[in-house]
Image: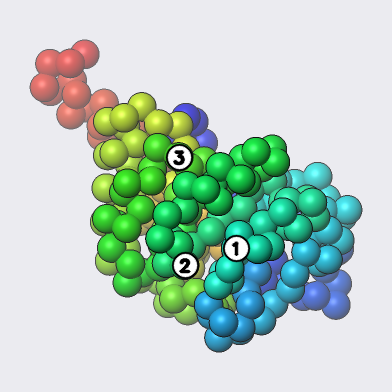
Amino acid sequence: MTDKIQIAPSILSADFTRLAEDIRLMETAGADLLHLDVMDGHFVPNITFGPLVVEAINRMTNLFLDVHLMIQDPAQYAEAFIRAGADRLMVHIEVMDDPKPLLDQIRAHGCQAGLVLNPETPFEAVEPHLANIDCLLVMSVHPGFGGQKFKPEVLDKARRAKAMREMNGWAWPIEIDGGIDAQTAKQAVQSGVQILVAGNAIFKSKNPTEALKQIRESAELAATQTSSTRAEIRTDEGFL
């Protein structure tokens, strides 16, 4: 697993009247992937878009498409989103008693599969399934709407996920979504996060390119400082 920080602009906050231009702007700004929030009006009280829009976005860009299914029945629609061009499908643990069949189904179609947990959902809900995922997404706001305030209490889940990942030798990254800007990105990375989803902080800023750059610089500095601190601790304990 790489510790490389990845920035994932959230298309939900883009201007849909000029979506192609916003996507090209994110490409030139150095975005690592695009985050696509799919909402069904049932699991969350909002409706966004379906496979047709994902397919259109896939035609616009070669960036990795991180498709977040905030929907009540992800198993029913998973294959449609994979056919539309999703590179990774993120599904909520809250709508499944046993996510393994769906995770296996997604992977069988050549797509990455990940789990998402809401702020109020305990880490124990995903803990039994961490050996079967390609990514873990920790929501730092309640899903359904952009522009919400970051909930720092969820960072304990990222820390626990990081500890379990290292203990078991797993390779999946930890992702966070909600209220991410240059300051909260630093907190998230210090807790073990590698993928930072940012919407309003990028697209609603006066200079989206500079906003993305500031988030990356803050996150990468935090990652470097965290790695240095860890190395110093190991040296003090006689491991190096």
Query: Mark 1 — residue?
Result: 74
187 shown above or below 17: above
The residue at the far left in this view is 237
Amino acid type at image mark 1: Pro
Percent across and percent down for residue 98 are 42, 54
Quick one: quadrant of the C terminus?
top left
Residue at 62%, 74% in the rendered image: 39
Query: Mark 3 — residue?
Result: 132
Residue at 32%, 58% in the rendered image: 125
Marks 3 and 1, Cα distance to the nearest angstrom?
Answer: 17 Å
Q: Are marks 3 and 1 in contact (CB under 8 Å)?
A: no
Residue 235 visible in the current orientation:
yes
Percent across and percent down for residue 17 are 85, 77
Percent across and percent down for residue 78 are 67, 57
Q: Are marks 1 and 2 in contact (CB under 8 Å)?
A: yes
Amino acid type at image mark 2: Val
Which comes before the other along the chain, label 3 or label 1? 1
Seen from the viewer's position, the closer of residues 18 and 211 is: 18
Query: Mark 2 — residue?
Result: 95
Q: Residues within 10 Å of mark 2 (few under 14, many from 20)?
A: some
Q: Secondary structure at mark 3?
A: helix
Amino acid type at image mark 3: Asn
